[in-house]
Amino acid sequence: MSAEPRRIVPTVVALASIAGIVAGMLRGPLVATGPALWPLSWVSWPVVGWVVNIRRPGNRIGTVCLTIGAVQGLAFAVQSMVLDVNSTAAAWMELTYTVLGVVPWLAILWLLVTFPTGGYAGRLERFLGRSVIVLAVWAMTGFAISPATLIDTGLENPLAQPSLSALAVIANDSGFFLVIALGLAAIIGLFIRFARSSGVERQQFRWLMLGGSVFVLIAGAGQFLPEDSAGELIWLLGGSAIPISIGVAVARYRLYEIDRIISRTVGYVLVIGLLAVVLLGALSLLTLVLPAESPLAVAGSTLAAAALFNPVRKRVHDAVDRRFNRSRYDAQRVLDHLSASMRDAIDPESVREQWLGAVVGTMQPASVAVWLKVGK
């Protein structure tokens, strides 16, 4: 395939996927029964798939990301029209998007098993990958022939086979537990491959683990968030964490800056947590001497937290850098020492020695030399 079609096909698929997802958000039955913005959490998959396909043509991970977005977009597009047709067509349409909806979730499992190469690294990965494929076929078949009433429309399944209800058990809670079990096995496999990896591949695993950690953190915090638009936006961030981290890892964009990103993420989380404690503590103390819910108490505690922001941020970032980004911390210390010592330096030999020491301390070259121009 020439270069131009390689760009056109992913672009068309990504745009069509996003259009379907937006249609599902605006007109789907889930808008009335669930979070209105939930479909948008899938937008990052076709976008990431498009980026990887453009930057790494032929990469399997990018193709699977784009496929996840395309299938989910098609499912949402069909769902958006289900209430506009007669009952017979509505039953077939709901059955279609129900069966299609199984594919993205299991494709994500397959991604975890085959990351970052898109192939099986060993026997465990091959077994898990094939198990995911078998489960996907079984789940799609189970939902297709399930005798249960369709959820959104309340209609009968046009392909229901009561005599095969044992096969349709996968559409119940047992299927969910199988997916969880496979997911745990896939994560264990990820840690095993990470422990054996090195170089670029090791950095790719660290990106995925960062995205997975953000997802788990937000999913846990989401249990305590109010069901409003702000809470939904936070859920969108969590839903996008894994595909975005996969895209960065596979496309290798600024791959080696993960240490700085981790240190800054941890740092700001700690800063926000500490300032929240200060804010609540100051508010509690001020309400002891001022009327409850007094604007002065709120203003005073807010000003106290704002005044402490920069000092707390600097101290927390320094502490976190010492733990998570040690090389940058040590390099910054060397540069600060060089800057301070050279303010009053006038001897060229002393300047040269200090400059060489800073270069060796920060960049650690195999060898270093200095050429100085003598005279005019």
Image: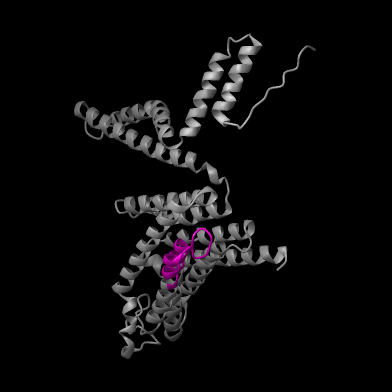
Q: Residue at x 58, y 67 (%)?
A: 16
Q: Is 121 contained in the magenta span?
A: yes
Q: Residue at x 44, y 65 (%)?
A: 125
**Foreground pick, 185 / 111:** 185
Where is 87 relative to 186, above or below?
below
Q: Which residues are magenta?
A: 107-130
Measured from the top left, where is residue 54 in percent x and y? 64, 58
In this rendering, position of residue 203 left or right of residue 139: right
Q: Residue at x 34, y 33 (%)?
A: 275
In this rendering, position of residue 181 left or right of residue 199: left
Q: Residue furthest right?
A: 376
Measured from the top left, where is residue 12 in percent x and y? 63, 66
Measured from the top left, where is residue 300 in percent x and y? 32, 27
Q: Is residue 100 visible?
A: yes
In this rendering, position of residue 71 left or right of residue 280: right
Q: Quadrant of residue 357?
A: top right
Q: Quadrant of the C terminus?
A: top right
Where is 148 relative to 358, above or below?
below
Q: Quadrant of the N terminus?
A: bottom right
Q: Residue at x 51, y 68 (%)?
A: 73
Measured from the top left, where is residue 375 in percent x and y? 78, 11
